[in-house]
Image (cartoon, rainbow, N blue to C red):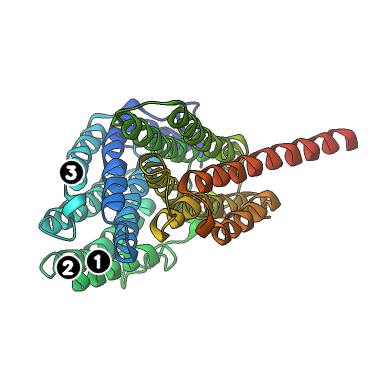
Amino acid sequence: MTATNDDRFAQSAFLRARGTASEGKVAFAELFFDLIFVLTIIQLSHALAAHYSPLGLVEAAMLMLAVWWVWIYTTWATNWLDPDKAPVRLLLFVLMFLGLMLSIAIPTAFGTGGLLFALTYVAMQIGRSAFTAYAMRRDWPENSRNFTRITVWTVFSAVFWIAGAFVEHEARLALWLLALGIEYASPALGFAVPGLGRSTVSDWQVSGEHMAERCALFVIICLGETILVTGRTVAAMELLDGFTILLLAVAFLSTATMWWIYFRFGHGEAAHLIEHSATPGRIARMAFTYAHIPIVAGIVLSAVAEEFALAHPHGHVDFKTASAIIGGPVVFLLGNIWFKAAIRGRSPLSHLVGVGALLALSLVAPVVEPYQLFMAAAVVLFGVAVWEFLSLKSTQADDVAVV
């Protein structure tokens, strides 16, 4: 970014000043915007727990992908737009209200709330992209064209979102999956539009510090939701005995371990790598836009698993309980493998072994009780965290010795 561009952005009515200490700062308006997604994640986990089946998993996954796409696109936009400036702050407040309506529609999205969900989702996607294209038109015309292309793609996908709201059951799911496929494929296609050309990764000059902190905050929202689920489930019990407290401690340990795995090694590295990369947009797209999807999904599924295990700790382990208890940590670790491989160039062995060990637990699921399987999965997850901690500490010590 040239000095002239830095000066131009500093005088902009919409854009963040570039090359300053505040460039990567997360604004309070962004944190306020995130509050809506606390409700959204709670709604998602409740809907999944209430309709846990193969079809329910597909529907929940589709809804989660849509919610994530709304949030991550807004994060990309506010990487350049300055939320401390009145027009951008107003945009976030409007998006926040629409996000509230989106959250309300989630439990009935495949029923009577389909049209509300589709309309609010489309309004958020098109409105934000069009606003960003307008805001950049004078001070950053190259990026304005990028968001014009994005707006065209969101209008195209909107046709299928709205059409899906007017049909039912499998037809709605099929049309909405097609709409999501269009939106998820568009970045890889460079948002190519006839007459407008296509975007390249070199166009996306992002602040790694801002992107890393925003995604980290979303992960914290999801982890917080697991604590809310755990607390709500235990609070509803008539008797709080020693066994329940033990399960509560295991559930908290599992949540804290996920925090450790994500934040102890990886989050800071990603921010540093983006800041010093010649193509920060490519790394940000892979490490944050895509790799965080299974991380978030794994946490949400783990919250459902904690609810199942705490509410019904004894008896036979059915498929629903086993798939949630094992699947949550597996999906979470796979996301971290993807995330850390994108920034380190290699997959952590501890995570790969952890996935294998968790899958192996499915062999003993028929002969144990739900609480035993839940405890075993927590032990595996904790073991992965300790292994990674010790291995990276050893690597760092070797590097110091060589120096």
| 317 on left or right of 34 | right
Q: Residue at x 76, y 35 (%)?
A: 393
Note whether residue 83 is visible. Answer: no
Above or below — where is 48 with respect to 160?
above
The amino acid type, in three-letter code, at marker 3 is Leu
Instruction: Residue 13: name its quadrant.
Output: top left
| 289 on left or right of 73 | right
Which numbered disc flags the more N-terminal residue, 3 or 2? 3
Q: Kindly report the distance in space between the C-alpha atoms of the residues bearing marks 3 and 2.
A: 19 Å
- Tell me, for residue 164, which label it has, or none: 2
Instruction: Residue 299: name its quadrant.
Output: top left
Quadrant (top left/top right/bottom left/bottom right) for the C terminus: top right
Q: Are marks 3 and 1 in contact (CB under 8 Å)?
A: no
Q: Residue at x 22, y 72 (%)?
A: 170
The amino acid type, in three-letter code, at marker 1 is Trp
Instruction: Determine the secondary structure under disc 3.
Output: helix
Other-residue count near label 1 (Cα within 10 Å), few / some / many at <14 / 14–19 / ≥20? many
Q: Are marks 1 and 2 in contact (CB under 8 Å)?
A: yes
Residue receiving disc 3? 98
Q: Kindly report the distance in space between the C-alpha atoms of the residues bearing marks 3 and 1.
A: 19 Å
Q: Residue at x 47, y 31 (%)?
A: 243
Instruction: Determine the secondary structure under disc 2.
Output: helix
- Tell me, for residue 176, which label it has, or none: 1
Other-residue count near label 2 (Cα within 10 Å), few / some / many at <14 / 14–19 / ≥20? many
Q: Nearer the viewer, residue 101 or 95?
A: 101
Instruction: Residue 237: name its quadrant.
Output: top left
Which numbered disc flags the more N-terminal residue, 1 or 2? 2
